[in-house]
Amino acid sequence: MLMLRKTAGAIPKPPKSKVYGFLRFIVHPRTLSCNKLVLGIETSCDDTGAAVVDETGNVLGEALHSQTQVHLKTGGIVPPVAQQLHRENIQRIVEETLSASRISPSDLSAIATTIKPGLALSLGVGLSFSLQLVNQFKKPFIPIHHMEAHALTIRLTNKVEFPFLVLLISGGHCLLALVQGVSDFLLLGKSLDIAPGDMLDKVARRLSLIKHPECSTMTGGKAIEHLAKEGNRFHFTINPPMQNAKNCDFSFTGLQHIIDKLITHKEKEEGIEKGQILSSAADIAAAVQHATACHLAKRTHRAILFCKQKNLLSPANAVLVVSGGVASNLYIRKALEIVANAAQCTLLCPPPRLCTDNGVMIAWNGIERLRAGLGILHDVEDVRYEPKCPLGVDISREVAEAAIKVPRLKMAL
């Protein structure tokens, strides 16, 4: 049994802070190796995740609590609700992880936790809980950048050496970066407004897909992908955004507005009210998915060409990694595969369960940092969470100045 103590002044406290009591788990007898062990904790958005990973990449135990079904009912993530659900579940998730790993906290080499970027109320829960563990067991603390963790996950599942190009696409993020080392990133481009997953979710809500019998339990992005298989994208002409901008930035707000106007027009044409399902919903889903895939593909193609032109990627062994929740969309992945093949680049994606938020990627990022001796804290007094935080050194202006023209590819999807 162990008791977690409240850590005074460690983070900005909400009005009603949660002080956790005993962690109830069974410590099984096991033969501990000399391997380093890291507990990873993830609460940056709406998933409460934890995992223990060793330095060889073995996942000893993991647990995850998803809030998806709760937020589906409200049509989006409500931060105070997400915070409360994290508070209610984080202790159980960590207990289950440690029990499945057959270790006690005293066996850990360090504790790694997402502290940036993300929803402030969600990040606060994970950080508060982690610091109580850190102070109780006198373990080193490794603060984790959420996007760095997504980028490095591929090194857990595949043998990938630095440098490599990464496209991170999710409901909250969209960026292209060159990964030169564990904490060495060059940012080539990012979304200028919203993320692709957010846009797809908004389109799904506007189409009222939660009322569709086949999509009622799916997230917006999953519903769009599912319905698009039944649709004909050629019924609507929707051009990808920013076609004349020769950089690697993204934009999805304009695409969302175009789709919104299209849906309004079709509702009037079909004589139905907002909230009812259009007969053309599948065609619209197919069209917006295709436009999104083409937009992501073209910017990624330019990033590959830029990196090769500047000798930042090996001409012979270039690797493109795609991660984040939207990376599980097989249609989008196929478009990126076409680009990778054309640019003589190897495309790699983590398995779907590691593309979405999870504790495994946080623990693995902790292992990577522990091995490299980077960002390992023994004094956590000044640790704060950061809801907004850039990744790496921004060289997007240099990319734009290069004005690389991307050859036209036939997207036979």
Image (cartoon, helix red, strand yellow):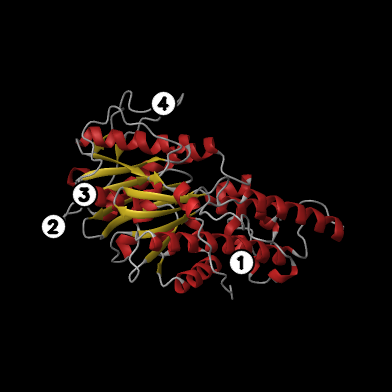
Residue shown at 46% from the left, 23% from the top: 15
What amino acid is labelled 3 in the image? Ala
The quadrant the N terminus occupies is: top left
The residue tagged 1 is 226
Badge 2 crowding class, 10 Å Cα cut-off, few under 14, some 14 to 19, many 20 or more, is few
Q: Give the mark, 3 or 2, whose residue is nearer the N terminus.
A: 2
Element under disc 2: loop
Could you tell me residue 245's position as x and y percent?
A: 58, 54
Q: Nearer the viewer, mark 2 or mark 1?
A: 1
The residue tagged 3 is 372
Could you tell me residue 377's position as x and y percent?
A: 23, 36
Q: Is disc 1 in contact with disc 4, using a CB cutoff of under 8 Å?
A: no
Q: CA distance from mark 1 to mark 4?
A: 41 Å
Relative depth, front residue between 63 and 11: 11
Q: Nearer the viewer, mark 1 or mark 3?
A: 3
Q: Is residue 280 above or below residue 124?
A: below
Could you tell me residue 39's position as x and y percent?
A: 28, 47
The residue tagged 2 is 31
The residue tagged 4 is 13
Give the label on residue 251, or none.
none
Residue shown at 71% from the left, 67% from the top: 283
Residue shown at 36% from the left, 36% from the top: 127
Residue 139 is left or right of residue 314, and the answer is left
